[in-house]
Every structure is written in structure tokens, then in C-alpha cells.
Image (cartoon, rainbow, N blue to C red):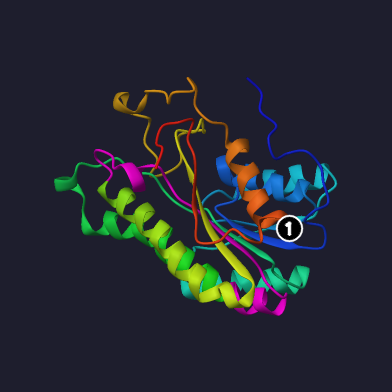
Amino acid sequence: MTHSAGMRPGDELAGKVALVTGGARNIGRCISLSLAAGGATVMVNANTSREAGEETVAMIKKAGGKAALYIADVTDPKQVAQLVAETVKQFGRIDMVVNNAAIRAETPFDKITFEEWKRVTSIVLDGAFLTTQAALPHLVKAGGGAVVNIGGLTGHKGAIHRSHVVAAKGGLAAMTKAVALDLAASNITVNCVVPGTVETVRGLPGAPARPDYRVSLPPVGRRGAPEEIAAMVRVLCGPDARYITGQSIHINGGGLMP
């Protein structure tokens, strides 16, 4: 099945600039492409996926969009500050921040080292905190904007062998509510898009092969496509979603109905 959700050209984001962390592959790539298809200029951030990031930027440019790649570790405050500064230097502003950077890990609770715990939680939580805070003055200067955090079904449902991922993604959903309240007066919406089981390319460092106990399908009978997640992100960044904030929006084929 081919999905093109969120990829149709438009102009609702014309003149806007988006910063997408973890924007090189899978869901992040589709988000970058979708926002560009809506007219936004996109700064694609990656850390370990330079080649994939360059491919994503090339895809955007081939489609007539504008984008650049910046390599930065979102857990490093100095690198995040440089990422934001370079985005503004190249494109003049920031209107949208999508916190997608994350790693998936499969480790029984009693085998999780503190280093692994910190690595997972720092990329998801610290990365979202640092990137949003660093971009905030520019969102305010732009007159408002949108922050979209990419959560995870496990953060709401739980999962075996993923205590660190569950804690991080659950924390991200909670952080979304708090930051939404803090930024509402500045005309900045903050939401969390929560993907269910999505068909993505495996094999990144820290991303093990999908185990047998994660092969079940949701009620709709298929895995989601990354483009379907990207479509919701694009909506939340656009002019029709200015009254939506502090929400966790689930896209999971009926796998969880909160």
C-alpha cells in the first residue's frame, strides 16, 4: 500500500521555517518532507545519520523546497544553541520546532545500565527541553508558532523491556502539557503526536530488530505509514490548528483508545 498523506503540495506554511530534530530518516524524514510540501523551509537535524540527512535535504530541494542539514547532538546544550543559531542565520527565523530525535532500545529492566537509561531519556526528554528552550526567543519574535513533540504509544500503554523508552515518552507527553501552559500567552502551541506501530526502516545504532512480541497489528490490520504521522504534524504546525494545544494526539490504528 502506498501512502501519500501529508505529502501533497500546499502553501499554508509558506514563509515559515521549521526545525526538525532527528529529521533524517523514517518518521523524521517524512515530517521534513511534509512540512516542506506545505511551503516551509526546513532545517533538518541529525546526529549519526549524515548521509540520510543529506538525502532528505536533496529530496526536499528536488521537489522545489528549501532545506539544509545541521549535525548536532540534541543532548548537548552548546550544540543545540549552535543548531538554533545556524537555523536563524541561514533562514532568518524559526516558526516551528518538531522534537523527533529518539532512540529505541530493548533491554530487560534488570539489565538496563544507568548509562543506557540516561542515553534514552536524555535524547527524548533533554533534547526536547533544550531545543524548545533554545528556539523559544525566535518563536516569540516570530509572533508565535508551534512545537510538536513526537511521543510513543508505549509511553501510554507500557511495554516489556522498554522501561527507559516508556519513561521518556510518557514524560514527553506530560512535559507537553506543562510547556503548553507556559507558552500559551505567547501564541505558541505545544502538542504531542503519539504514533502507534509504524512501518519504519530498522537497523540504526541502538535500534534492535523488531522482536517477535512486537509483531501484532492494531485493529485496522496494518502498521501505520510514517507519512500518516507526518500529516498530523503538518496540521498542528498550520493555521487551522491554532486552537489546539497541550494535547497528545494518538495515531495508532485503534491500538489504544484513551
Q: What stretch is highlighted in magenta?
A: 135-162
Report x, y in % for residue 4. Answer: 70, 32
> Which residue appears farthest toward the left when viewing the image?
110
Residue type for callout 1? Pro
Does 69 sit above or below residue 253?
below
For the C terminus, the image quarter is top left
- Asked if one can make out residue 75 in the rendered structure from this viewpoint, the answer is no
Quadrant in the rendering for residue 70: bottom right
Q: Is residue 144 magenta?
A: yes
Label 1 secondary element? helix
For the N terminus, the image quarter is top right
Residue at x 46% of width, y 41% of height: 204
Q: Name the residue under label 1.
A: 239
Nearer to me, 174 or 33? 174
Please give left or right for residue 54 compared with residue 200 in the image: right
Report x, y in % for residue 106. Answer: 29, 40
Nearer to me, 99 or 12? 12
Residue at x 71% of width, y 55% of height: 238
Residue at x 43% of width, y 69% of height: 178
Report x, y in % for residue 71. Answer: 59, 60
Please give left or right for residue 22 compared with residue 38 in the image: left
Q: Does the magenta stretch include residue 217?
A: no
Quadrant in the rendering for residue 52: top right
